[in-house]
Amino acid sequence: MSLHWPWALTALLAFPSLLAFRWWIRRRRRREAVRLSTVALVRAALPGRSLWRRRIPVWLFAAGLVVLATGAARPEASVLVPSNQATILLAIDVSGSMCSTDVAPNRLTAAQQAARDFIEAHDDGSKIGLVTFSGVTGLLVRPTTDKKELLAAIDTLRTGRGTAIGLAILTAIDAIAETNPDVQPTGVELPAVPGGTGDYEPDTIVVLTDGRNTQGVDPEQAAAEAAARRLRVYTIGFGTTEPAPMVCNPDQISGDLPFRGDAPRWGGSYFGGRSFQRFDEATLTQVAETTGGEYFKAENAQALSDVLVDLPSSIRLQREETEITFWFALAGAVLVLLAVGLSQWWNRTIALPAASLTRTPAASPTGPSAASLTGSPAAGGASRARAP
C-alpha cells in the first residue's frame, strides 16, 4: 500500500492531543469537586460501570481517528481489477504433427473448434489476434474485435513442417507493440524482469502447441523478451502419449512438406506416419513461469476447449494501483459512531423508582426523619392530628 498524500499523516497527532485534553479535563474536575453530605444518594444516581466499559468508547474513538487520518493521506493499493482493453494474441501450432488422430478427428480440427469456441465466447471489449507457426511464423489476423474475420481465418489453417515456438512468441510481441505504445518491439533491448513481480500489461499471449521447438529462437529466450515487456504468456500442451495415424484432409495440408518414401506420403486424404505426444512440458512450464503466465495440459478436444474458454477470466484480471480512501473513511466513521453510541448508552441517566424517594427510614437521633423532609402523606396526617 502507498500513500498519495503522506504529509496528511500529521492528522494522527489528533490522537495524542485528545489524550492530553482528556487528562487535563479530569485533573480540573478533581480540583473543582464539590463535597456532598449524602454520598449514598450520589452513588445511587450514578450507573455502575466497570473499568473495561469506561475504556472501550475511548479506544474505539481513538482507532477511528487513526483510520480517518490514514484515509486523509489517500492510500492506494495494488488490486486485481477486470480490464476490457486487453489484447490477446492466440498463437496456434500448425506443424505436421497436428494431423495426428489421437484426438478425433485430428489435432488440427480439434484446435480449430476450440479456437472458434474461444472467439465466440469472448466479449467485444478486447481484441484478439491470430498467429500461426510451424517452421515459420506469421501474423494471420491483426488484433481486432471482428469475430467474423477471426472465424474465417481459423478455417484457413494449413499444416507445415517444423515447430518454431520462440519465433511465434516474438511475432506476437511485435503484433502487440503495434497497438500498445507501452510495449516495445522485439528489436529494442530491455533489461530482463523476473516473472511474478511488478505490474503486467493488459495484453497477453496464448501459445497452443503439440510439439517441441525444432528451429528458430529458443522459447525461453523469447519468454525473457516477453517478461521484459511485462507481457504474460500462457502455454497449452495438446495431445496424448498414444501413437496414432496422422490424417489430414486436403484443405488442411500445405505444399511445403517434403515428399520422400513413406513419410509423408499423400493418398486421398491420408497423410502417412504415426505420431504421439512430443511437446516439451518442462519448456512450456518455464515459459509460463518466466512471464507470470500459466501452463495447461489438454489431452482431448473438450479439455482444450475448456482451457481456452476459461482463460479470459484469468487474463482480464490486471493488477492496478487503486485509491482506497473510501474504505478508510467508511471504517473510521463506523468506529467513531460506535464509540459515541456506546458512550451515550452506557452513561445515560437512569431514573430512580418513585418508591425509593417516598420510603420512610428509621428515625435518626440527630434530626428529623426523611419522611418529614419528603412531605409524605403519613407525616402530613400526623401534623394535622396535632392541630387544635
Image (cartoon, helix red, strand yellow):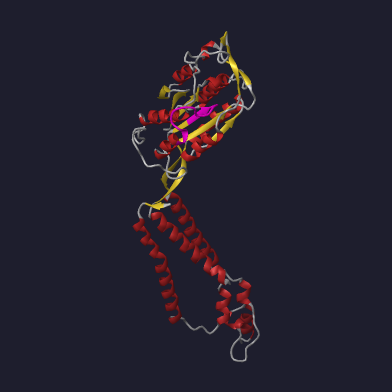
Along the viewing direction, whichever of 17 and 285 lies nearer the viewer: 285
Label count reads 0
Residue at 51% in and 32% down: 235
* Magenta segment: 206-220
| Residue 275 position by quadrant | top right
**Could you say where residue 107 lies in the image, as x and y percent from the top left?**
57, 21
Residue at 44% in and 36% down: 221
**Could you say where residue 287 lies in the image, as x and y percent from the top left?**
49, 36
**Could you say where residue 169 lies in the image, as x and y percent from the top left?**
44, 30
Magenta part, dominant SS: loop
Is residue 124 something that shows in the picture? Answer: yes
Q: Which quarter shows the C terminus? A: bottom right
Find the residue positioned furthest to the bottom. Answer: 365
Residue at 62% in and 75% down: 356
Q: Is 106 drawn above or below residue 180 in the view shown?
A: above
Please state if 99 lies on the left or on the right of 23 as rendered.
Answer: right
Along the viewing direction, whichever of 302 and 269 lies nearer the viewer: 269
Q: Is residue 279 magenta?
A: no
Q: Is 23 drawn above or below residue 169 in the view shown?
A: below
**Could you say where residue 313 lies in the image, as x and y percent from the top left?**
52, 34
| Residue 71 position by quadrant | bottom left
Is residue 125 something that shows in the picture? Answer: no
Find the residue positioned furthest to the front. Answer: 261
Q: Is 249 drawn above or below residue 225 in the view shown?
A: above
